[in-house]
Amino acid sequence: MSSIALVTIVSSFLASAVEFVEAVTIVLAVGVTRQWRSTLIGVLAALVALTLLVVVFGTAIVLFVPIDVVRLVVGGFLLIYGLQWLTKAVMRAGGARAKHDEAAIYEREIAALRAEPPIPATGMDWISFTVAAKGVLLEGLEVAFIVVTFGASAGMLAPAALGAAVAGALVLGVAVLVHRPLAAVPENGLKFAVGVMLTGFGTFWAGEGVGIDWPAGDATILALLAGYVVLALLGVYIVRERLTHRRLRMAVAGPEN
Amino acid sequence: MRYVRAFFGFWYDFLVGDRPELFLGPIAALFLAWLMVRANLPAPTTGALLFVLVTAVGGLSIAWAIRD
């Protein structure tokens, strides 16, 4: 297996694992509070829709769009998306944004679901179906986006899909075993790592798309990833310092009135 | 018409959201890199500039966010 295929699998696995953890929280909340059968049918419907999306769009892009165009447009999207993840991760790590807390989200979901109308005595519970399908579809769309963009830019759609499928199976398997939200998964750290990966690969491929002949070829990716890690950590430090100074200034100024 | 609006609304939220600088910034950075490639500037310089511009966009976005 080539190193680029391995990196594609790992990146897709990590990014997908984060999204699947979020989807599992919603599915567990619906299943536990309402009806498992309708919830699982909703999950299945969403998974079929997502698989079709990846197969249709991924294959169409790989087969019919020239690789330079794919790298510019799709690599550009990957860069934009990666930078969004990375900046949010930096702000979370620096304390400027609330960290993702699956246990709290789970409790909120359960409280919202208990306020819904009662479960029908027979047949489908459409509330379970809709909430589970919507949750998996929305979180899964991010997985599909990453698989298609990452896979198409690297010409590695199958490895990207494999990474996502393994992540899905693993997260689902663990959730079934422990039967509660996977709050112990270091989601914020994973998001930081994925943000660096998407930004690094997005820069590389979109750069190739505009015609940059990277001096060290594929090895440039490592330099880009290292550069983004260092600068992101520096960003975390600066955000923390800024917030600490601001809090100190406010404490010294005292409460108004 | 409602579905078309919802479709584009979804993608707008997905890619742009409340931080348009993170959508427009990388596009502007890639456009500048393309101009430098067209001007036959050395690849290491162009690549380094793209990296710096992307980092600057991210840094500015964070600075604006924490200022608010």
Image (spheres, rainbow, N blue to C red):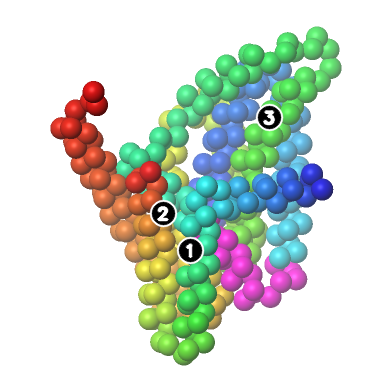
Q: Is residue A76 magenta?
A: yes
Provide the secondary structure element on which disc 1 rests.
Answer: helix
> What residue span does the magenta drawing correspond to?
A62-81
| Separation of marks 2 and 3 at Cα, in angstroms | 34 Å
At 15% from the left edge and 32% from the top edge, which residue is drawn?
A252
Position in image of residue A67 (x %, y %):
64, 74
Q: Which label number is shown at residue B61? A: 2
| Separation of marks 3 and 1 at Cα, in angstroms | 35 Å
Residue sitting nearer the eye, A132 or A160: A132
Q: Which residue is mark 1?
A: B25
Residue sitting nearer the eye, A22 or B22: B22
Q: Is residue A20 magenta?
A: no
Q: How many marks?
A: 3
Position in image of residue B20 (x %, y %):
52, 55
Q: Which label number is shown at residue A132? A: 3
Q: Is residue A244 visible?
A: no
| Image quadrant in which the N terminus of chain A is located | bottom right
* Residue contact at pointers 1 and 2, CB within 8 angstroms: yes
At 64% from the left edge and 14% from the top edge, which residue is drawn?
A115
